[in-house]
Image (spheres, rainbow, N blue to C red):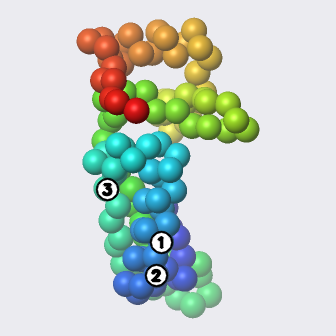
């Protein structure tokens, strides 16, 4: 994902990484911290009349040992990636998915 020229330099990347990490941990739980890796790559600036100069931020996420839910409009929702698409699962689909994804049961952490 290209963030843009406003992230150029260590200070911009540092601030953005802090914001991104806090946002992800707020949404997915602090125990997800070990699953996230954030890296920045400096791109060669293109010609001034072409967009895309700046830094690239790459977020790598390891598979979670348990389901992670997203709260939207006060409702917990569960999404999966299938190819290049994101799909929300219905409860019946979620239960089947859990059996397949975590055949030995999902890891349950303390609250």
Work out which residue is located at the far front of the displayed protein and give it: 111
Numbered disc 2: secondary structure: helix
Neighbor class of circle 1 (other Cα within 10 Å; few <14, some 14-19, many 20+) is: some
Q: Is residue 36 left or right of residue 97?
A: left
Q: What separation in Å lies between label 3 and label 2 (alpha carbons)?
A: 18 Å
Does residue 102 lie above or below 87 as drawn?
Answer: above
Upstream in the sequence, badge 1 or badge 3? Answer: 1
Question: At 47% across and 42% down in the image, what residue appears?
Answer: 28
Judging depth in this view, the residue of 61 and 73 nearest the camera is 73
Question: At 57% across and 90% down in the image, what residue appears?
Answer: 48
Question: At 26% across and 12% down in the image, what residue appears?
Answer: 104
Does residue 42 lie above or below 36 as drawn?
Answer: below
Res. 37 mark: 3
- Dots 1, 2 in contact, CB < 8 A: yes
Across and down, in percent, residue 62 comes to 31, 42
Q: Which residue is mark 1?
A: 16
Question: At 33% across and 29% down in the image, what residue appears?
Answer: 109
Q: Is residue 58 left or right of residue 94?
A: left
Across and down, in percent, residue 83 comes to 47, 33
Res. 12 mark: 2
Q: Is residue 61 visible?
A: no
Q: What separation in Å lies between label 1 and label 2 (alpha carbons)?
A: 6 Å
Numbered disc 3: secondary structure: strand
Across and down, in percent, residue 36 comes to 34, 51
Work out which residue is located at the far right of the displayed protein and give it: 73
């Amino acid at each position: 994902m290209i963030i843009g020229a406003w992230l150029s330099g260590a200070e911009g990347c540092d601030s953005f990484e802090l914001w991104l990490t806090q946002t992800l941990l707020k949404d997915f739980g602090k125990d997800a911290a070990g699953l996230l890796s954030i890296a920045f790559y400096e791109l060669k600036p293109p010609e001034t009349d072409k967009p895309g100069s700046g830094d690239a931020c790459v977020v790598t996420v390891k598979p979670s040992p348990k389901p992670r839910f997203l709260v939207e409009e006060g409702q917990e929702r569960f999404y999966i990636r299938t190819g290049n698409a994101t799909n929300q699962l219905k409860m019946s689909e979620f239960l089947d998915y859990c059996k397949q994804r975590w055949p030995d049961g999902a890891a349950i952490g303390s609250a």
